[in-house]
Structures are given as C-alpha cells and as structure tokens.
Amino acid sequence: MLGSFEERIIDGETGFLFAPEARALVELVEKLRADPTLLEKVAQALVDLPHHRDVAQMVADYRAVLPVSPRPVARFAVGIGEETALTEPYRHLLEAYRHIEEAYVQSNAAYEQTRVAYEAAQAELDSFKRALANWRREYDALQARENWRRVPKALRMLRELPQRLSMAENEKVISDMQQRFGWAERLEPELLKSPWWIGHIPFAYELIGRQKPRVLVELGTYSGSSFAAFCQVAEACAAGTHCYGVDLWEGDIHMGNFDESLYNEIYSYVTSKYPAVATLVRKDFNVAVSDFVDGSVDLLHIDGTHTFEAVLNDFNTWLPKMSARGVVLFHDINVNMENTGPAALEFGVRKLFDSVKCGYPHLEFDHCWGLGVLVVGKNPDAAVLELVELSRSPGFKEYFAAKGAAVSQRFADLKSPPQLHNTHREAKIWKRAVNKAHHGLSELRSMVGKA
C-alpha cells in the first residue's frame, strides 16, 4: 500500500513501510521482486480481513489520524460524467506514484546504457578478431619463407599490425563504408583467372556503378578478370554501357608470348555471358583508337605494356577520346622490388601517374600492385568526385584493400595453376612495331591529303 500512514500499517503483514524517498521505494520494490512471497503474504492477509470498509470510512479514518481543515476541493473527471474529490491523502498517493515512475525511468535508462556499452564492447572485440584474421591471411599468402624477396614486406606487415588492430576498434567507420559503397557490397566476381588485378574489382564495381559509363575501353584485357568484372557491373547498372576489351593477345615484354587458347577462352566467356555488353577488339592500341570518335569514352583502363614510354603513349593517344565525364585507370602504380622483384625495374606506371596526376582530381590505392584513378573529364559525375573526396577519409583505402584481399583469398582458395607463357624474347613483338608503323603511315597520308 502506498500513501498510507505508519499507524495504519503493520509492516510486512498488512503492507510495507518505507521512508518517503524515491531511493527507499526503489529498494523496497527490488526486495519484493527478489522475494515475491512477501507480497503474496500481505495480499492474503488483506483478503482475510474480517470486513472491508468503503471509501467514506477510509476518509474518516484518515481525518482522525490527520485532521484536515475544511477547504474547497479540486475535482476532476473520472470516466464519463463522473467526478471524484481529490483529497489531500490522494495527493500523497499521486506524488508517490510519480516517484515510482521516475525511479522506473532511471532504472530503465541505466539498463539501456549498460546494454549499449556491452554491445559496443562485443562489436569492438569482433572487429578486432576480424582484423587479426584478415592480417593473418594476408601474411600467410605472402609466403615469405618460400620467397626471400618478400621478407621486407613481411617485416613491414609485422610493424603495421598494431596500427591495423587499432583501426579495427572503429567499427562505425567500417559500417559507414558498407552503407556508403553499395555496389562494392552488392556484387561478387564471377571470373577469377589471374591474381594481378582482382584486388581492385570491388572498387571497379563502385566506380562503374556510380559513373554508369556509356563507353568503357580496356587496353590490355589479358585473361579477362578485370574485363569480366566491368561487364558484370555494367549489366547490373542497366545503363546501356558497352565495354570494349582491346588487346592483341600475343604478349609483351612483361608477360611473354601468349598461347591462342588465352584469347579463345575469354572470347567464348564474354560473348556467351555478356553478348549485349562486351566486344573484344583484337588490335594494337594505336590502331584501335581510330575506331572511337573523340569525346566518346567515359572510362578508360590502361593495363598494357607497363614501361614509362608505353604508358605515356597510351595516355596521350587516347586522351582526346575521353568524354567530359572521363575517368582513366592505371594499373600497377605500386610495383616495386619487394612485391615484384627485378622485373619492377621495367615498370614506369608510377612515374607516369605522378607526372600527370597533379593536373586532375585523383585517388590511388597501394594494394594489389596499385591502382591510379584520374578524373580527366571537365564535367565529371558528382558521385565520382565524391569518391575522390572520400579517399581522404579514415578507413577508405583500408576498406577497399580489405574487400580486395577477400577476393584475392577466394582466388587463392581455388588453387588454380598459374598461367605460364614463353619468355618475352620469343614474343612476336615485331608485330606491334609493324602496327605502329602502319598507324604512323596512315596519319602521314591523312596529313598529306589535307594539305
């Protein structure tokens, strides 16, 4: 019973007494919740009372204990058309109820704070475990024990481990990234043929999903992992994108001489799976450029011969073809002795990218031998520029590196045998030289004709 007087209660038998304080009431409620038999005992005692008094009798008893001087009483509606006098004892009852309500709210708030803190701690622990597991997979995939050239990178990974684990504490950043990059989260690669580019497939999904290019051109399609991913997201966008994969499929100084089966395999795949999206162009880059009108290409991926001179030629040759929305991708901007060995000395993509990037909005990734993104169009899509801005945010590069590492791990789990090619000395590089000579001759004839 609440709001009564000590003279009318036998504590623990016909009711419970407590000091008129919210804390005392909360303690009593906690005690009764812990031992419901106490409440049951009082309830039974009240039922067993010899007689029950009406309201008038109870009011008379209250006045006998605490005389109340005559005064106007407040009245309030109860139900429909009924009114009841709100006497002073009932005011005490209402005040006690408000104390109970306040104590309940405070107790609820304390519980909610505890629950939120527990869930946050659990999420942080789960994030820590995932980060450690991802690091372990990357470290094991490095196979530094079998390849001494990778030992420096293994040591660097060990030094960076505390930093990576500390980043894992910010689970909210990861959650925000997952919500922001819907295309990277939505799609999974369907063709994984070689390890060299596949770590950038999640970013390609996001970029193409945002830009929705009308014409996409890839220079250097090779076995088709990147090109198939481009076609996949282009089809998913349903924006009328057409993808052109340009390559001679004969080889170069980096990859050696390609077998004809390489072209046949990718040709069969894309023509059967993406007939309305994909076209393979078996021409030299300098020859194929004539197939495209100026300002028509929205997205260009340069991934052919990687010497500085070759990449510079590809960029300058195809730049006039880029549209006002144009974006150019450069693969292998992070090839070095640690991740590639002596062959890295022949790569000049990093040098070329550094020489041109300052003139355009850009972003870059270090993982999977590196990817440079150059926004060359004068009126690029806002969603693409947002990627450039977000690239400066904490967790951006780590997010796409982790997504790429997961794809690379999928490829490693396939245990596909490596694609072996003959050495570059056996490659038919002379055909490229002949094609370039024919292209130069055509330009000369055109100039003479105009004169």
Image: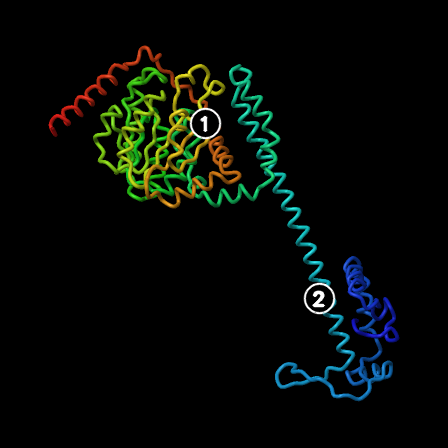
> Between 377 and 381, which is closer to the camera in this rendering?
377
> Between 410 and 443, which is closer to the camera in this rendering?
443
| Mark 2 residue crowding within 10 angstroms, few (<14) / some (14–19) / many (20+) | few
Q: List x then y, in percent, for residue 309.
A: 33, 21
Q: List x then y, in percent, for residue 16.
A: 83, 68
Instruction: Tell me the residue at 38%/16% (across/down).
Output: 420
Q: Quadrant of residue 54?
A: bottom right
- Look at label 2 and name its amino acid: Glu
Element under label 2?
helix
Instruction: Tell me the residue at 43%/18% (across/down).
Output: 344
Q: Is residue 75 above or below residue 149?
A: below
Q: List x then y, in percent, for residue 415.
A: 46, 22
Labelled disc at residue 368: 1
Of pointers 1 and 2, the one earlier in the residue sequence: 2
- Look at label 1 and name its amino acid: Cys
Which quadrant of the figure contains the C terminus?
A: top left
